[in-house]
Amino acid sequence: MDANKKVFAAFGVAALMLAGCSGEPTQTQTNFGASVRQMVEAQTANPSTIASPSAESMQGTDGKRIEAVLDAYRTDVAKPEAVNESVNINLDNAR
């Protein structure tokens, strides 16, 4: 009889574990990745080119102008100016 109780208990625990895995997806699981997709869509200048990029979307750009922009970016943006002012934070009145 003791063995039957152990087998019955094991089946009961297995049934409870399987019941915990079933069910509808939560709201978080349903919308997983939606915020990233929305952000990418908001940052895309022409969303129609994502699905089907074409040569037409690349026209209207001068190569020399783009090269000048990249050179300016590499020389100016890559070397930011140093901050000469110190920052003081007063924590005496913090709550």
Image (cartoon, rainbow, N blue to C red):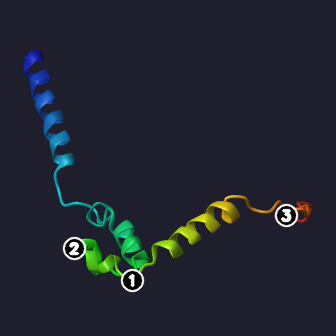
Judging by the rendered image, the residue that carries numbered circle 2 is 52
Q: Amino acid at mark 3?
A: Ala
| Circle on res. 44 | none
State the SS at label 2. Answer: loop
Q: Amino acid at mark 1?
A: Gly
The residue sitting at 90% across, 65% down in the picture is 93
Task: Give yes or no for contact between labels 3 and 1 (Cβ–Cβ under 8 Å).
Answer: no
Judging by the rendered image, the residue that carries numbered circle 1 is 60
- Camera-side residue of 90 and 78: 78
State the SS at label 1. Answer: loop
Q: Is residue 40 left or right of residue 18?
A: right
Q: Earlier in the sequence, mark 2 or mark 1?
A: 2
> Quadrant of the rendered structure where residue 95 is?
bottom right
Q: Is residue 37 left or right of residue 25?
A: right
Question: Does residue 94 lie above or below 38 as drawn?
Answer: above
Label 3, label 2: how far apart the Cα atoms are: 55 Å
Count of labels shown?
3
| Circle on res. 94 | 3
